Image: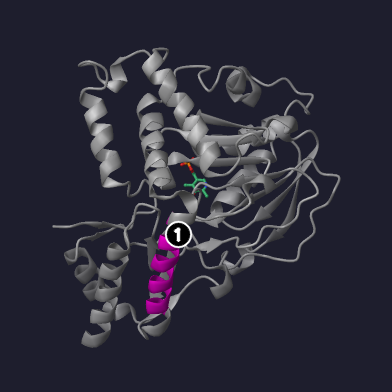
Amino acid sequence: MQRHNFSAGPCVLPKEVLQKASEALLDFDNGLSLVEISHRSKSFVDIMEQARALALELLGLEGKGYKALFLQGGSSLQFLMVAQNLLEKKAAYLNTGTWADKAIKEAKIYGDILEVASSKAANYNYIPKGYEIPEDYDYFHCTSNNTIFGTQIKKFPKSPIPMVCDMSSDIFSRTLDYSQFDLIYAGAQKNIGPAGTTLVIVKEDILDKVSRKIPSMLDYKAHIDKSSMFNTPPVFAVYTSMLTMQWLKDLGGIAAIEKENDKKSRLMYSEIDLNPLFKGFAAKEDRSDMNATFTLLNDDLKETFDTMWKEAGINGLDGHRSVGGYRASMYNALSLDSVKALVEVMSELESKA
Ligand SMILES: *Cc1c(COP(=O)(O)O)cnc(C)c1O
């Protein structure tokens, strides 16, 4: 049966990437597996360099003073690593969801945190706008896409201080001027590759500004100095991420995938809006192109609907416990056909009900 994987993360990856990654697991270098050769061998060093270069190339950040790193510890480690490296006294955060809230909690260990705005009181169903970012703070932190609630920042504020962005769930999905950010981080397991590595893109000139001593493993500079090989990197995750970025480049880059993502989210949201059995969760203007959150208006239909989508080969549609209902995650590797399959089930439910 053809599967349609709407999982929020870890999630769908391109089939051809999985095919190549599994081949490398068995035989990468003359009968040796990718995971049994030295990470200092020329063949792996080349992969790390390709991965770092591709990340900057896809985002249009080559030659602009940025470095790309593939670290470990997930985006959750970045919550504190950002503060460790950039927070001298105080930082400004936009609170748009569970992940932003967690980032704020970690940053508070290092200094004073100002929440410039928050949509927490509305269970994060919209993106606050019209807030001020003060000039005398060390940096401003935001979350581009709220994976759990299904909201996405469409227009970023002009920040007078370095702007840091958690792009875990929408990196490489849309064209933006990425040079408006000074630091971007993203756990690989949503739009890049398997869990186990985190892409960090940092503008070098924002570093070296804090007075505290930074342990080497938490120091961006130490990782930059060692070309993202300060210690043994997660070789399989980096290799597979490199393959996904290569796949995206071959497709035509972010501009090409953005068109597909647009078609997918338009189809999805038009069904949510036109089908009288369903209701969208997020404010319309802030709806995420990656994660569509919605509920059934009549809970009595839940069992029937759940059986129907599962029978159609759909996976991972259950909403997060803090929102309930359903969440259709439509990352880069999910095809328009998968969205069509889901929309078909939704309209079939309408004709039955
Ligand atoms: C999934 C996610 C995280 C957490 O990532 P980990 O790699 O599990 O630490 C952080 N931020 C956002 C926006 C996410 O979607």
Residue picked out by circle 1: 290
Q: Which coloring applies here?
A: one colour
Magenta span: predominant SS is helix
* Side of 133 relative to 329 (left or right): right
Locate residue 158, reporting x and y percent: 75, 55
Specify the farthest residue to the right.
136
Q: Quadrant of the C terminus?
A: bottom left
Compared to residue 323, the image places residue 92 above or below, namely above
Q: Classify mark 1: residues with Cα within 10 Å, few (<14), some (14-19) or many (20+).
A: many
Locate residue 196, reporting x and y percent: 41, 33
Q: Is residue 263 magenta?
A: yes
Asked whether 326 or 28 is in front, the reply is 28
The answer to whether the residue bearing label 1 lies less than 8 angstroms from the nearest atom of ligand 1 is: no
Asked whether 229 or 125 is in front, the reply is 229
Locate residue 85, reporting x and y percent: 69, 30
- The residue at 35%/28% (across/down) is 236
- The residue at 58%/72% (across/down) is 285
Region of the chain picked out in magenta, as a range: 257-272
Q: Quadrant of the N terminus?
A: bottom left
Q: Quadrant of residue 36?
A: top left
Q: Quadrant of residue 271?
A: bottom left
* Side of 173 relative to 108 (left or right): left
Compared to residue 346, the image places residue 163 above or below, namely above
